[in-house]
Image (spheres, rainbow, N blue to C red):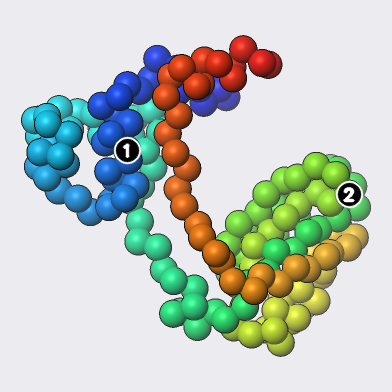
Amino acid sequence: MNHTLENQIDSTDIRILEALMDDGRIAYSTLADEIGSSNTLVHQRVKKLRDQGILKKPVFLVSPEHAGYDTSAFVLMIVREANEILEVIEALKGIPEVVSCISIMGRYDLMVRVYAINNRHLQDIVHDKLQAIPGVEGTNTMVAFEVSFERQITIPDSETVAKYRTYR
């Protein structure tokens, strides 16, 4: 599926998206005032952005540290056979400490982000849960000392999208 932004969003949409990414609870009336528009236009644009799949659901982000998770790690995983990758991904979805799974290229097939209460908990997750998944041949765990920053993606303008679409 092609998720191109070309001809889908304009500068008003970008301003709405940036405001919502900064504060997902902002009132539409406040947002309308900030961008110099009407409430009706903001409602219509947000609905359009949702319908197009550009804007997903608003959520609160929980601080892992404040929830009791003192250890964060990235685990690189080797899957024995390519046809087992989807089954491994499905098994990973059932492990609550795994918060993301990314298919990657190179020596490893998957990279998962894991939160654990401490290093002992992390060891149990890796040994008893991740390495126990049928099809997993090996893992390499990297413990994160701290997250220096995390942020939302920026919304590229149409000229930037058009420029890089020509390099296919």
Q: Quadrant of residue 10?
A: top left
Q: Which image quarter is the C terminus in?
A: top right
Residue closer to the observer: 55 or 161: 161
Q: Quadrant of residue 54?
A: top left
Residue closer to the observer: 74 or 155: 155
Q: Position of residue 118 (x, y in %)?
A: 64, 85
Point out the residue furthest to the front here: 148
Q: Residues within 10 Å of mark 1 (few under 14, many from 20)?
A: many
Tell me: residue 83, above or below residue 61: above
Q: Tell me the SS state at disc 2.
A: loop
Q: How many labels, in total?
A: 2
Q: Position of residue 156 (x, y in %)?
A: 45, 29
How many angstroms separate mark 1 from mark 2 (CA)? 37 Å
**Which residue lies at the image location 17% right of the left edge and 34% below the top edge?**
35
**Which residue lies at the image location 81% right of the left edge and 58% below the top edge?**
77
Residue closer to the observer: 153 or 101: 153
Q: Position of residue 12 (x, y in %)?
A: 25, 26
Tell me: residue 28, above or below residue 146: above
Q: For the residue marked with disc 2, what is the amino acid?
A: Arg
Q: In this figure, which residue is indicated by the disc labeled 1? A: 17
Q: Quadrant of residue 63?
A: bottom left
| Sequence-first disc among 1 and 2 | 1
Tell me: residue 127, above or below residue 82: below
In this image, 79 relative to 93: left or right?
right
Q: Tell me the SS state at disc 1.
A: helix
**Which residue lies at the image location 86% right of the left edge and 55% below the top edge?**
78
Q: Which image quarter is the N terminus in?
A: top right
